[in-house]
Amino acid sequence: MNIQESVIGIDLGGTKILIGEVTKGGEILGAKSYASNTETQTKAVEVLLNALDDYTQNIGFIAEKQVGIGVGLVGRVDYKSGIWLEIEPGKTNPIPLAEILNVKTGLSVSLGNDVVCATMAEKQFGWGRETNDFIYLNVGTGLAAGFVVEGRITQGGHFNAGEIGHTVIDIHSDISCGCGRRGCIERLASGLGIKEEALRHLKDYPKSVLAKNQAELTGKMVLHAAEEKDELSGKIIDNAALQLANLIMNMVRTTDPECVILGGGVTRNEHFFQKILDNLQSNTIRFVTKGVVRSKLEKDKVGLIGAAVIGMNLGNEGGKE
């Protein structure tokens, strides 16, 4: 194998760091997963640097030359200045991560939010090859979106665009969200939200299969129980699908996309995905000509590929300008 150039991709999430070598054609030449620590940004960077050392020394690179590094980060990122601003509100400690990695490796470095990176992966190697106007909706542990309009992704004046998990869908809700509001969709329809809904209502459904293992309950377990006709799980999933459909229809009215792409582990569940589609109103989405679809890219690798994409400097996203 004689590969001339590659990019180092780093996908730093809440529970793991995935480091890999990616070609400009999107092929992953190698990758390794490490446990992350996002207790603080300083600790997260320390763990990231140690993981990069391990990868470089023990895995190594296949291509003859690495032309850059792209890093996808949970939280808010100033991609223009190469600064990781915060993991989440309340955990704010701006770190010049692009500069730190540049000094360490001698390579050019681009940073981006993790969902921005996933959107860029879709733009470069997925449905984005068919349209310049799409929304990438990530429904995983949390819930966020990337908006691509005329080929460019919107990141906002404070690098906080796409946090649609904090869209209020129930103004009468008593469910508090970390953002300070009540009734946010992330608390009802993300993987974590689905789990929390189950725990909130289990006392009213003592015969639910979910009551057997509350300590290890996950959103995935609720999805599976709904497929098996568990009453509580069915109600939670029906409501989550309805609210996600409402969110999609609201977003469609905002940017007029040709395609809405669903990413993240939650929407990989076929039963749940079909319920979302069933709740879409045809007149509202009539201009979504390429449909509400699922990502073509592997969910566990989309963040890594997206990080590499911004490291390639193929668009306006990522890195210092």
Image (cartoon, helix red, strand yellow):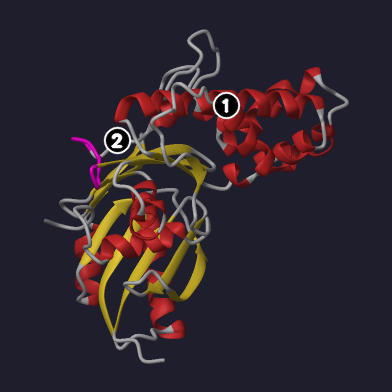
Residue 179 visible in this rendered orientation of the protein: no
Query: In the image, is 287 to the left or to the right of 93?
Result: right
Residue 37 visible in this rendered orientation of the protein: yes
Q: Percent x, y for residue 69?
A: 28, 68
Q: Amino acid at mark 1?
A: Leu
Q: Which contiguous range is marked in magenta?
A: 150-158
Magenta region includes residue 290:
no
Query: In the image, is 307 to the left or to the right of 159?
Result: right
Report the front residue among 288 and 166: 288
Report the front residue among 81 and 169: 169
Count up the numbered dots: 2
Instruction: Name the residue rendered at 19%, 71% in the picture.
Output: 103
Determine whether 13 is above or below 7 in the image.
Answer: above
Instruction: Name the residue rendered at 47%, 55% in the picture.
Output: 37
Instruction: Name the residue rendered at 38%, 81% in the picture.
Output: 56
Determine whether 252 is above or below 11 in the image.
Answer: above
Q: Dot 2: few (<14), some (14–19), or many (≥20) neighbours within 10 Å? A: some
Q: Percent x, y for residue 12?
A: 41, 57
Report which residue position mark 2 lands on: 161
Residue 188: which disc?
1
Q: Helix, strand or loop at disc 2?
A: loop
Predominant SS along the magenta part: loop
Instruction: Name the residue rendered at 68%, 23% in the picture.
Output: 200
Point out the tag, 2 or 1, that comes first from the N-terminus.
2
Determine whether 213 is above or below 314 in the image.
Answer: above
Magenta region includes residue 156:
yes
Q: Percent x, y for residue 94?
A: 24, 47
Q: Helix, strand or loop at disc 1?
A: helix
Determine whether 294 is above or below 66 in the image.
Answer: above
Residue 275 placement: quadrant:
top right
Residue found at the far left of this picture: 321
